[in-house]
Amino acid sequence: MTAVAQAPAPAPRRASRRVREMTGQAGWTVLGWAVGIAFFIPVLWMVITAFKPESAAETWPPQFAFSPTLSEFRLVFSGMGPFIEHSAIATVGSTILVLVLALPAAYALSIHPVAGWRDSLFFFISTKMLPVVAAIGPLYVIALKAHLLDNIWLLIILYAAMNLPLAIWMIRSFMLEVPGEMLEAARLDGAGRIREIVEVIMPVVSPGLVSTALICVIFAWNELFLALNLTVTNASTMPMFLISSVPQEGLYIAHLSAAATVASVPVIIVGWIAQRSLVRGLSMGAIK
Amino acid sequence: MAGVKYVGVSRVYAKGAAPAVDALDLEVKDGEFMVLVGPSGSGKTTALRMLAGLEPLDGGRIEIAGRDISDVQPKDRDIAMVFQNYALYPSKTVAENMGFALKMRRVPRDERDRRVREAARILDLDPALLDRKPKQLSGGQRQRVAMGRAIVREPKVFLMDEPLSNLDAKLRVQTRSQIAELQRRLGITTVYVTHDQVEAMTMGHRVAVLSGGKLQQCASPRELYDNPVNQFVAGFIGSPAMNLVSAPLADGGVRLAGTVLPLGAQVRAAAAREKLTELVIGIRPEHLHLHLVGEAAAAGGARADGAELAGEVLLVEELGADALLHVRLVGDAAVADGPAAAEAPVVGGTPVVARAEGRKPPAPGQRVAFRVQPDDVFAFHPQTGARLAG
């Protein structure tokens, strides 16, 4: 009965629903763009400012007509050599160390779970619950006694320790995606532990490994607190260089912008190259 | 070539829990196609996995070709397994998938290639597919690659764990006969697990029916169908399933649907020995011979012969060649009341399924009567489920 009574209604109702759906979609699109622009404008501002002469950088209202110059970049390039070298060593070194340690750990916590794997898993993540500030005192003393202060090896070790729990959790979740039947097939085919990992597990989890490595690279590259407190010159990294770009007196915004732009470039490039595997890797554990 | 022997094999997953496989004794002859069948939780897959070495034994031993392999590594058992989801390596090509086990055994590349191509030929797998990745194949092709991976190893025993369950119905029927034919050609001892009794009946030389971790019966498909040893096997084998009804014993037979269904003298003697007052009666759908349709049934035609069961058709399932009648058997009272009772809807009564000719099945609501041959009636112990010898 109700169907009969409503018979004339569908056409306009369907149309109105479509209008509502479209406005809803448009609303989300506008919001998405707004958020995207809000995040992008400071970055754009930084890049534009980096090309300004120092005198034009701090005017108010901001100048949009200016003759671009590379003088600040030249200044940055002339001074950043050791910093970028330290950053690269600490980042690459710690990321390799993380992967080398996290792979077997994740394997032992997923594919062939060891006794007490739950406790181990919780222990790893619990190390992230203590603020780094609370640990800096003891860390300083340990570094001092071990003669590792202002030493790049200290940063490699600390960055590896910092990223290791996250890496283990991530790689473990990727390994859980490896079908059990496939591992059994490998066992029947006669693959040992090493073959199993290299030929069967690795191809399946490699996108996950790439995304894990990228996240470790980004975190290590951007780390400031430990570098600031435990290094001076022999191991100081790019974030330290940014701080050193701020002089005690005088204008510095253009110089700082140029330095920050240079410092962001590696992360942006790395993220850009790997964005597909990053999305795939990060959503891998979420599918099931 | 080799047979397989389970000797008192048990598997207990958790302490105190019922064993998943309970003292299984089973012998698979050399070159035989043995199907393990049973509902989920019957232990059939566990039994297969123990043979593969993927599951440890908690008791007993398993022999292949007379050698106790209970503690031998899976790779050294000289077996090959086809998994339910095929378990192909996604990053390897079809040829690499099929040749992986040989590579692990350090078989030279030429020999590997030759055996992979040979397997592809046996399976009718297009050689062009050998360089593809599993992702680029259809479900049926993947299934054949999984078979190929087993064949190239030239093992003593094939193990198959529901390898057809991921195929669509038509392909499943087709592949079913291909696998059976292939097994016959290669003559390799095969243990095949399925929950589908049609697969079991059509493929196996012999079928082992499992339930609750225990072997119920192991026999040829025909023997299982004609001579089930207990109520479980009787109900599990056959589609549609055997009608199982509990009925009180009466003089010369059992009382069912207001009439006395005669039983053989041996069955009656067995029931008397066991001091039973009630039996479970089993009748296959095709053994309910449609005898009378319509008024005659209701008017008391059934009175002439004690072995006729009267009922009302509830539903007709047309299968083409034949039709399945879902019938409720009606008791004495309804039949005795004559034509008036035909109008009254049947309340209660025993539901049964009968197979009838497809051309002119009775309509729903119609009164029917069935004749049953005494030899076609199975009788089971109501408590133990054991068949009472007939």
Image (cartoon, coloured by chain):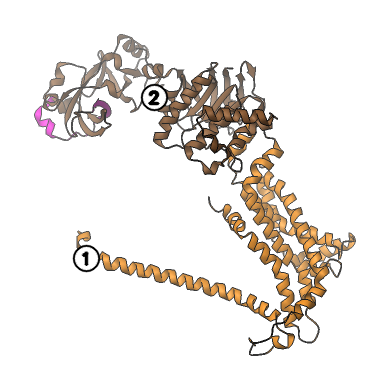
- Residue at image mark 2: B237
Residue B244 found in image quarter: top left
**Residue A184 shows in the view:** no
Q: Position of residue B83 (x, y in %)?
A: 54, 34
Return the residue found at the far bottom: A60
Return the residue found at the far left: B339
Among the chains pictured, the one given orange colouring is A
Q: State the separation of the CA atoms marked 1 and 2.
A: 56 Å
- Residue at image mark 1: A8
The colour one sees for chain B in the rendered image is brown
- The relative height of residue A160 versus residue A83 in the rendered view (above or below) is above
- The relative height of residue A123 versus residue B311 in the rendered view (above or below) is below
**Residue A50 shows in the view:** yes
Locate the C terminus of chain B and report the quarter of the image it occupies: top left
Residue A277 found in image quarter: bottom right
Crowd tier of the residue under label 1, counting other residues whose Cα lies within 10 Å: few below 14, some 14–19, many 20 or above: few
Q: What is the chain identity of the residue bearing mark 2?
A: B
Return the residue found at the far front: B128
Per the rendered image, the range of residues in magenta is B336-358
Residue B128 found in image quarter: top right
Badge 1 amino acid: Pro
